[in-house]
């Protein structure tokens, strides 16, 4: 009986979550509750071998779709680390927020390995008040950037592939398979 309840609860929670699909089978789900947002970054296990990390980032439409000054999160596959990062003005490898005077504002970090995929989860405030994080506003349009790449130990190397899509940050937003054709390559 508890199993049925868990399945029903999962279906209800997924129906009120925003969702974006990316190449390589990557998915990002989010759920806004009050002043916070919870993310589930879903990585197919088949991608764990070819790549060492995957990341997502937010940029306002006004700021453009490059990595420069973007608010990023990187998921390191082997260690399970989930890192709060900020894009350099020069559009290079984004350093940890803490390395540039910011704070790690990601809470409740968790890596959950399933049979076919791994879920990296975290929660943050919509407005962390951290200069190295972008305030997120429910209902606002953003570029949602994605990237995958290799690493050397814990050091993430330059991405092997990356792109961006335009989203509305809301619990009822969802991309479709057709959205893959509209990805903007940022290499």
Image (tube, rainbow, N blue to C red):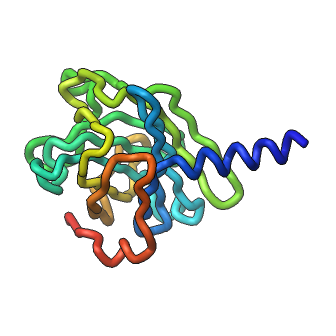
Residue at x 41%, y 55% (from the top left corner): 173
Q: Is residue 13 left or right of residue 96?
A: right
Residue at x 28%, y 74% (from the top left corner): 182
Q: Is residue 17 left or right of residue 163?
A: right
Q: Is residue 151 above or below residue 95?
A: below
Residue at x 38%, y 59% (from the top left corner): 148
Q: Nearer the viewer, residue 156 or 185?
A: 185
Q: Nearer the viewer, residue 32 or 95?
A: 32
- Screen quadrant of the C terminus: bottom left
Q: Is residue 28 above or below residue 164?
A: above
Percent x, y for residue 10?
67, 46
Residue at x 11%, y 48% (from the top left corner): 63
Q: How many numbered marks appear?
A: 0
Q: Is residue 163 left or right of residue 51?
A: left
Percent x, y for residue 128?
30, 24
Q: Nearer the viewer, residue 151 or 34?
A: 34
Percent x, y for residue 162?
29, 63
């Amino acid at each position: 009986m508890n199993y049925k309840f868990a399945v029903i609860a999962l279906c209800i929670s997924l129906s009120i979550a925003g969702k974006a699909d990316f190449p390589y089978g990557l998915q990002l789900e989010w759920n806004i509750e009050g002043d916070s947002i919870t993310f589930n970054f879903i990585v197919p296990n088949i991608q764990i071998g070819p790549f060492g990390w995957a990341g997502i980032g937010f940029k306002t439409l006004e700021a453009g779709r490059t990595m420069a000054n973007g608010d990023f999160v990187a998921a390191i596959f082997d260690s399970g680390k989930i890192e709060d990062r900020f894009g350099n003005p020069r559009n290079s490898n984004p350093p940890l927020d803490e390395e540039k005077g910011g704070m790690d504002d990601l809470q409740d970090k968790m890596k959950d390995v399933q049979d076919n995929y791994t879920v990296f989860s975290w929660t943050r405030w919509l407005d962390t008040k951290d200069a190295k994080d972008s305030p997120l506003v429910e209902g606002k349009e953003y570029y949602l950037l994605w990237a995958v790449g290799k690493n050397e130990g814990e050091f993430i190397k330059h991405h092997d592939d990356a792109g961006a899509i335009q989203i509305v940050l809301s619990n009822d937003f969802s991309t479709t398979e057709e959205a893959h054709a509209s990805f903007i390559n940022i290499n």
